Amino acid sequence: MRTVEWCDGALKMIDQRALPWKLEFVRLESVEAVAESIRDMTVRGAPAIGAAAAFGLALAARKSETDTIDALISDLRKSGDLLKAARPTAVNLAWAVEKLLDIATSGEFSHPDDLRQILLAAAQQIADDDVAINSRMGAHGAALVNDGATVLHHCNTGALATVDYGTALGVIRAAFEAGKHFHVLLDETRPRLQGSRLSAWELERLGVSYDIIPDTAAGYYMGEGEVDIILVGADRIAANGDFANKIGTYQLAIMAQAHGIPFYTVAPTSTIDLSLSAGKQIPIEQRDPAEVTTPYGNKIVPARFKARNPAFDVTPHRYLSGIVTENGIARPPFAESLQRAVAGDVL
Ligand code: MRU
């Protein structure tokens, strides 16, 4: 089952807001609806929003009634800006939009209908590649998970956060499918609860042993010697290896170093942004404070109480043991190994 897929002229996606209670699907037929579904986190996770945006642009091309290539390109640029503005941190979204716009502006198409067809095929290719890339990352990363280990995981990085299979959770899945026995501690991941709602749902279905823990308990379990390795995803990795990921990742990385626990991020090379030299340049999305004060409609405090809600933080590369990519595991110095990973070298 794919999280994001093209189905009978529309984008079909799992509604991640309804899980784990209900497995529901949405069917989107316009680029505006796709942008909104990214903003409201019907679909979330860096690779999944990249694929959704690609299909969103293909929808924009189909809906545009223009009959010249130039007018179509102009519509596509506007739609691309709309999609990119939906969520700023995960570079996969901008990466997918730019990939399709590069095709549109390549000068190779003289008829709008040819371009419409090619853009849909390109979006489909991004989705198919994502599944293949995740399975390669799983194969590279599975060796990091030892039999009998306890793995700590943050947020949701599984099939739901990608087109299928997953990144950090994909490594966990690959280790499980290789017959290893281990246990996973899932940070609940406040305020959107991607760990307790989504990662637990995925591990339940796979049959992997897990416990949900409060985010604030991670240090306790590290101090007790119960955590052998930490695996997380990434939304954007700068050229020096600093990376943005779900809020709370930075504090996990510091605690991991204090306890001598290996700390890895798992991400496709489309998450690496070589145009940024360091993590400080990564834009951090600030979400509605109501997600903190009234999560999923549950009024925890009066609406007038003040809150802040940064969706991501940046972890400096010095805390990272390695970055698992589809081309192998990048190790320090990351400035060099990431260049090679992006160039397609086998690490
Ligand atoms: O706000 P979200 O749920 O989109 O954040 C997701 C994460 O931070 C993931 O770790 C990241 O996108 C990698 S998912 C394969």
Image (cartoon, rainbow, N blue to C red):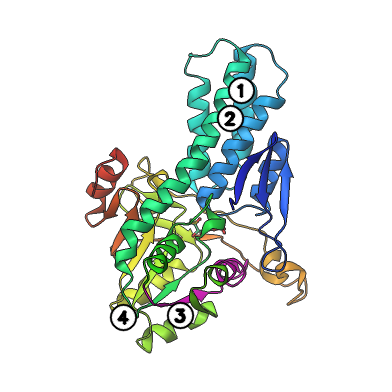
Amino acid at dot 4: His
Amino acid at dot 1: Arg
Q: CA distance from mark 4 to mark 3?
A: 12 Å
Contact between labelled residues 4 and 1, with CB atoms less than 8 Å apart = no
The residue where tag 2 is placed is 120
- Inspect the magenta stretch and tell me whether residue 184 lies in it: yes
Q: CA distance from mark 3 to mark 2?
A: 43 Å
- Inspect the magenta stretch and tell me whether residue 197 lies in it: yes
Q: Residues within 10 Å of mark 4 (few under 14, many from 20)?
A: some
Q: State left or right for residue 303 relative to residue 4.
A: right
The residue where tag 1 is placed is 116
Whichever of callouts 3 and 2 sits on the residue coming sooner in the sequence is 2
Q: Which residues are magenta?
A: 180-202
Amino acid at dot 3: Ala
The residue where tag 4 is placed is 259
Closer to us: mark 3 or mark 2?
Answer: 2
Amino acid at dot 2: Leu
Contact between labelled residues 1 and 2, with CB atoms less than 8 Å apart = yes
Contact between labelled residues 2 and 3, with CB atoms less than 8 Å apart = no
Contact between labelled residues 2 and 4, with CB atoms less than 8 Å apart = no
The residue where tag 3 is placed is 218
